[in-house]
Amino acid sequence: MDLIERHWESARRHPWEVARARFFLRLLDRLGCIEHTAAWLDVGAGDAWFAGQLRAVLPTTARLVCWDVHYGDAELSGSEPGSESREIVFTAERPPGTFDGVLMLDVIEHVEDDVAFVRDVVRDSLADNGWVLVSVPAYQRLFSDHDRALKHYRRYSPRTLRSTLESAGLTVVARGGLFHALLPMRAAVVLRERHRRRHLPQTGIGGWQGTEALSRAIVLALDSESRLSLAMGTRHFPPLPGLSTWALCRRQNTGGRR
């Protein structure tokens, strides 16, 4: 969860966030990243809830660093509620050294110059044989008040995401869509928004107030759908349109630093 979306009075996780975490953990496991990655960097880690889920399935010898420029003293001391700080290092500055695996989950849409940002991370923080996993909100036509509230600069199609990553020095080796059933729902919301005269307040996923039963039902539905997303994304099918799009990449030049 982005730090801007946090509401500590509501500790219940949004079903979207739970299903998203399960999908990426399965993806990383399917591609062998869980077992073979010794050093992890979670860029723009937010409240580190996903990092906590990841830490629970990593080998005890693996190193996991959460880097977010918006971290304050509470997060850096590990005392922030929900920070999942056990065996995780927190930093507000770019950590030194290189990492075998780099996560940028719903991060680069917050950066004005996304290509330069990714290129800098690849150059300074990615090991020569390392990988990068990127996810972003999909389709610029769906840009809405929700994106403005979360300080997004843009949304991405699978093609524009691939172009961005290749321009930053990466080669896409697996990619796909996620949350396919939510795509027409979001389109309907955006269409209705464009016909309103006034903007409504946006709370993001941190404002979820659904019951536990409703949350479980939605997670089950999204989780079932995401298994199809996983199968297609790891078998090199064309990306199935969804509310999110993702790509796992390697360096374009794996023989040494650029």
Image: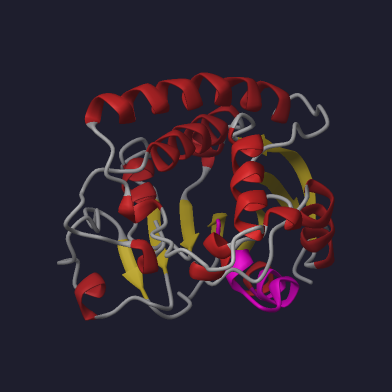
Q: Quadrant of residue 46?
A: bottom left
- Residue 210, visible in the rendered structure: yes
Q: What is the image's colouring?
A: secondary structure
Horizontally, residue 95 falls left or right of residue 189, namely: left
Horizontally, residue 204 falls left or right of residue 125, namely: left
Q: Which quadrant does the N terminus fall into?
A: bottom left
Q: Which quadrant does the C terminus fall into?
A: bottom right
55 magenta-colored: no
Give the residue at x 38% y 48%: 50
Give the residue at x 19% y 73%: 77
Give the residue at x 75% y 55%: 141
132 or 206: nearer the viewer: 206
Give the residue at x 21% y 53%: 86
Q: With respect to residue 208, does 20 lie above or below? A: above
Q: In which quarter of the image is residue 175?
A: top right
Q: Where is residue 214 in the image (x, y as percent from the top left)?
A: 31, 27
Q: Position of residue 122 (x, y in %)?
A: 67, 67
Pick out the residue farthest to the front: 197
165 or 240: nearer the viewer: 240
- Residue 137, visible in the rendered structure: no
Q: Give the range drawn in magenta.
A: 106-120
Q: Where is residue 11 in the image (x, y as percent from the top left)?
A: 20, 49
Horizontally, residue 243 falls left or right of residue 220, namely: right
Q: How many marks?
A: 0
Secondary structure of the magenta portion, mostly?
A: helix
Q: Position of residue 244 (x, y in %)?
A: 63, 44
Q: Quadrant of residue 83?
A: bottom left
80 or 249: nearer the viewer: 80
